[in-house]
Amino acid sequence: MKKYQDIAILLLRLATAANFLSPVADRFGLWGKAGGWGNWKNFMAYAAQVNSFAPAGVIPFLAVAATTLEIALPVLLIIGYKTRWAALGSAVLTFSFALAMTYSFGIKSPLDYAVFVDCTSALLLATMPRYRWSLDELLLKK
């Protein structure tokens, strides 16, 4: 129903953002012992496993680039600025994660972590006609 679409879009923006920010918080130890990595060193080891096809010297760049995007894209989604581009970037980033995970661990890994769902939900978000309650909407009105 159309009357729920604006709420669904807002919730999709926030959920997509949370799906990026939670792992970032974990790799910086903000989730404490409950987290999966708990620190940057453990995350780097995991990044090397996920990107098993990449030379070891490239892993720090990939980890920093991914983390930077996993911070920037959700911030854009939360405030609703350049939302379509942030959603497309999120879809591309999660699809690249899915490909790397599939190559390194097999198809079960990205399925278990719902990476394809994250990718397609971000892609769906990019197709929305408008983003109510966003900075984009405010700027459009000016």
Image (spheres, rainbow, N blue to C red):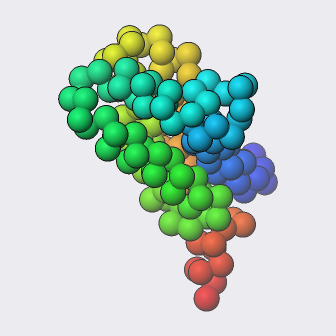
Which residue occupies the extreme bottom position in the image? Answer: 142
Q: Residue at x 58, y 80 (%)?
A: 140
Q: Is residue 132 visible?
A: yes
From the viewer's perspective, is 90 left or right of 130? left
Image location (x, y in percent) of residue 129: 56, 60
Residue 124 seen in the current view: no
Task: Give above or below for 76 relative to 54.
Answer: below
Nearest the camera: 47 or 103? Answer: 47
* Image vertical order of residue 106 relative to residue 133, above or below: above
Where is residue 58 drawn, in percent x and y?
A: 25, 37
Give coordinates of residue 32: x percent, y percent: 71, 32
Q: How many marks?
A: 0
Q: Residue at x 45, y 51 (%)?
A: 69
| Nearer to the camera, 60 or 136 | 60
Q: Residue at x 45, y 59 (%)?
A: 85
- Image position of 7 (left or right of 23): right
**17 or 134, nearer to the observer:** 17
What residue lies at 44% left-to-right and 24% top-to-bottom?
46
Figure quadrant of the C terminus? bottom right
- Res 93 → quadrant: top left
Name the image quarter holding residue 137: bottom right
Please state the horizontal and vertical placement of residue 5, each as a whole percent of the image.
71, 51
